[in-house]
């Protein structure tokens, strides 16, 4: 079945990804105009795989499988959070890169959003907790219950963020120099 046969004429499918090396969240949202609804969302469990390389292989296989099954028009990813642990960041970046490679192999455009941008788009607060994001998504999508792992709702938030911002030019931060960096990252400034 081709993409055109599967979807309504103006419908788009967004694949949202919340990268992770132990648990990776994914979500598929269909949009038509301003309307949106969930096709599917969940997590890819990776803890059971012993090596980082095997985890990356599984990420590529699972994301490729999701793409082949649902034929998304675009992929939206949450950018890695800049934390203190460099090794964790490297691993997370690799996981994100492998998910991106799966989309690129199928010629699917990719947009990346900062965690702050995703939270701001869904809750109105760029510093919202995972639980606050999940609660807002429960309201927006009229969900009766939430999954146990919030990585799934994080991926759903990324997809919805993309829908809200589709067509707009994306930038990281406010581009106001060091002052905005310090305001946005107070825990990264040594006094």
Image (tube, rainbow, N blue to C red):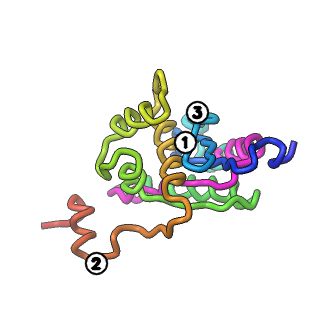
Name the outermost residue toward the top. 144
Left or right side of 158 for 172? left
Which numbered disc, 3 or 2, marks the residue that appears first in the sequence? 3
**Callout 3: SS:** loop
The dot on residue 48 is 3
User: Measuring 47% from the left and 21% from the top, which residue is drawn there?
Assistant: 144
- How far separated are the C-alphas under marks 1 and 3? 13 Å
User: Measuring 49% from the left and 53% from the top, which residue is drawn there?
Assistant: 164
In the rendered image, residue 81 lying in the magenta stretch gets the answer: yes
In the rendered image, residue 78 lying in the magenta stretch gets the answer: yes
Is residue 130 visible in the rendered structure shown here? yes
Is residue 60 visible in the rendered structure shown here? no
- How far separated are the C-alphas under marks 1 and 2? 32 Å
The crowding category of the residue bearing disc 2, from other C-alpha atoms within 10 Å (few below 14, some 14 to 19, many at least 20), is: few
Which numbered disc, 1 or 3, marks the residue that appears first in the sequence? 1
Locate residue 86: give its quadrant.
bottom left
- The residue range painted magenta reads 59-86
Tag 1 and tag 3, C-beta contact below 8 Å: no
* Depth check, front residue: 165 or 74: 165
Residue 10, image x, y percentages: 70, 50
User: Which quadrant does the C terminus fall into?
Assistant: bottom left
Locate residue 75: give its quadrant.
bottom right
Q: Nearer the viewer, mark 1 or mark 3?
A: 1
Which numbered disc, 1 or 2, marks the residue that appears first in the sequence? 1
Tag 3 and tag 2, C-beta contact below 8 Å: no
- How far separated are the C-alphas under marks 3 and 2? 43 Å
**Callout 1: SS:** strand
Name the outermost residue toward the bottom. 177
């Amino acid at each position: 079945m081709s993409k055109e046969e599967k979807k309504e004429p103006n419908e788009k499918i967004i694949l949202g990804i919340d990268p992770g090396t132990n648990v990776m969240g994914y979500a598929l949202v269909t949009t038509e105009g301003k309307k949106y609804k969930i096709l599917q969302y969940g997590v890819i469990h990776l803890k059971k795989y012993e090596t980082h390389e095997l985890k990356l292989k599984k990420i590529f296989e699972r994301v490729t499988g999701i793409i082949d099954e649902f034929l998304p028009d675009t992929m939206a990813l949450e950018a890695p959070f800049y934390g203190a642990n460099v090794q964790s960041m490297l691993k997370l970046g690799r996981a994100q890169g492998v998910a991106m490679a799966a989309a690129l192999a199928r010629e699917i455009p990719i947009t990346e959003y900062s965690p702050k941008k995703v939270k701001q788009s869904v809750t109105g607060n760029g510093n919202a907790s995972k639980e606050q994001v999940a609660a807002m998504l429960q309201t927006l999508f009229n969900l009766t219950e939430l999954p146990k792992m919030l990585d799934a709702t994080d991926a759903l938030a990324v997809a919805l963020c993309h829908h809200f911002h589709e067509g707009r030019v994306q930038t990281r931060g406010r581009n106001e120099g060091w002052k905005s960096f310090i305001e946005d990252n107070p825990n990264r400034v040594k006094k």
